[in-house]
Image: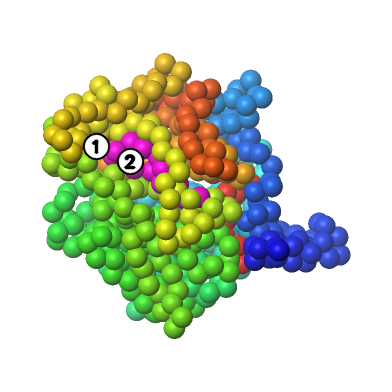
Amino acid sequence: MATDMEVQQNAKEAVAVVNGCCKKGPGYASPLAAMDGPKESLIYVTCIYTGMGRGKPDYLATVDVDPNSPSYSKVIHRLPMPYEGDELHHSGWNSCSSCYGDPSAARRYLVLPSLISGRIYAVDTQKDPKAPSLYKVVQPDDVVKKTGLAFPHTAHCLASGEIMLSCLGDKDGNAEGNGFLLLDSDFNVKGRWEKPGHGPLFGYDFWYQPRHNTMISSTWGAPSAFTKGFNLQDVADGHYGRHLHVYTWPGGELKQTLDLGNTGLLPLEVRFLHNPSEAIGYVGCALTSNMVRFFKNPDDSWGHEVAISVKPVKVQNWILPEMPGLITDFLISLDDRFLYLANWLHGDIRQYNIEDPANPKLTGQVFVGGVFQKGNAVLAEAEDGSTYQVDVPEVQGHRLRGGPQMIQLSLDGKRLYVTNSLFSTWDRQFYPEMIEKGGHMLQIGVDSEKGGLAINPRFFVDFGAEPDGPSLAHEMRYPGGDCTSDIWI
């Protein structure tokens, strides 16, 4: 018997072939159709000089990920931004699978919000996918004047053709001014998305599930706090979040606030399951290192529970006696079978089977860095009081720096790409070696049948060897979309 997701895929594909197969928009008819999409050959990476003292602008790198190419695992193009001091961070598309039913739509522009400067860049990837070019710059003064918003973070395309961005504060870094920015299809500022008086407590990430008329957003903290580096006192003083905000979609009314309590401090990335009929998702809570599952109740309210807990590790020679894993990114495979998370401080990537969403099962784990890897000063303590360090293999003769931060999965679920920069100020605080030597990018082989993770020894992109000096690497995007950019309606 066909699953619900397979039925949806067949129905959408049937609609697409009416009056000819060309009558379709960008992306794929369904998440399962995306899994059968072409294998990735290029990946775009946001690269940062901001905060490194090099006097250079941030840039977008194009990396060759075709194993049959002579330039495999190499940066083949760099597009510098026209200004310094941006702190490129996350990225999104002007159009994605949410516009699949619109033949006039095209996935052409990569949207690059600048977390610090507030600029938003639109980059044309269609003219030459290997060498993208700058199309337009949305200036922060225009955004502030029309909306009061600043510190843009997550960008998602909407089925309407508009682009929506979460903004984490006002121009002075106050969390009270945060909300959601709407741009039209040519990147003109339209205004705020949420209704007046319905702003969130803090801002960070968001994801919408149209069949359930719901958008859920997460809460990092006040820019005035996190831009200075992490201070535990700021958590106690209420400058960081622990809530999820539930909005009507597309209405923009805040209908419920979920207090995650002390088990849900610093909820960052938020994802629904890809099946658009599902009313289930997860959020990664960084400081408490829990994956919290959220779900729709029979009365249409939303509930939550801890689904995965990464235990803190007792350590010596660190700023605290216990070290959290610090879950800073996670994603879900397009078939909703596996969840992958990155523990930036502990240094490991984990794979969980989530076919039973309430009871994830650990199926794979690999260490690719971390604070207590061999060669560092920090020691981990075992339960018996003995100390140990994690043996992290070199890749192509390179000692792995920092910890796993952003991750991106291939459409077929067999390759996981990993970068190691979180945010330049926090990189300097927790992994100062990265400011001197730069970041890198790895590829992890994935067993998508039984589970399992392994470093690919053939793949290593060293952003410490860039022509203008070592840079930091963050978000990754394929030209054709991926499991963290595309939403199905």
Residue 390 placement, left or right of 4: left
Instruction: Give the image location of residue 52, x and y in percent.
Output: 31, 33
Q: Is residue 374 above or below residue 474?
A: above
**Which amino acid type corresponds to the residue marked 1 in the rendered image?**
Phe
Q: Looking at the image, is mark 2 or mark 1 nearer the viewer?
A: 2
Residue 324: x and y in percent read: 24, 45
Q: Which residues are magenta?
A: 338-351
Task: Work out whether mark 2 precedes mark 1 in sequence or the reverse, and give the earlier one.
Answer: 2
Q: Residues within 10 Å of mark 1 (few under 14, many from 20)?
A: many
On screen, 371 above or below 324? Answer: above
Q: Is residue 332 left or right of residue 20?
A: left
Residue 277 location, quadrant: bottom right
Total numbered labels = 2
Label 2 sits on a secondary structure element that is loop
Secondary element type, mark 1: helix
Distance CA(mark 2)–CA(mark 1): 10 Å
Q: Which residue is mark 1?
A: 430
Amino acid marked by disc 2: Trp
Residue 400 seen anywhere in this rendered image of the structure: yes
Magenta highlight: main SS = strand
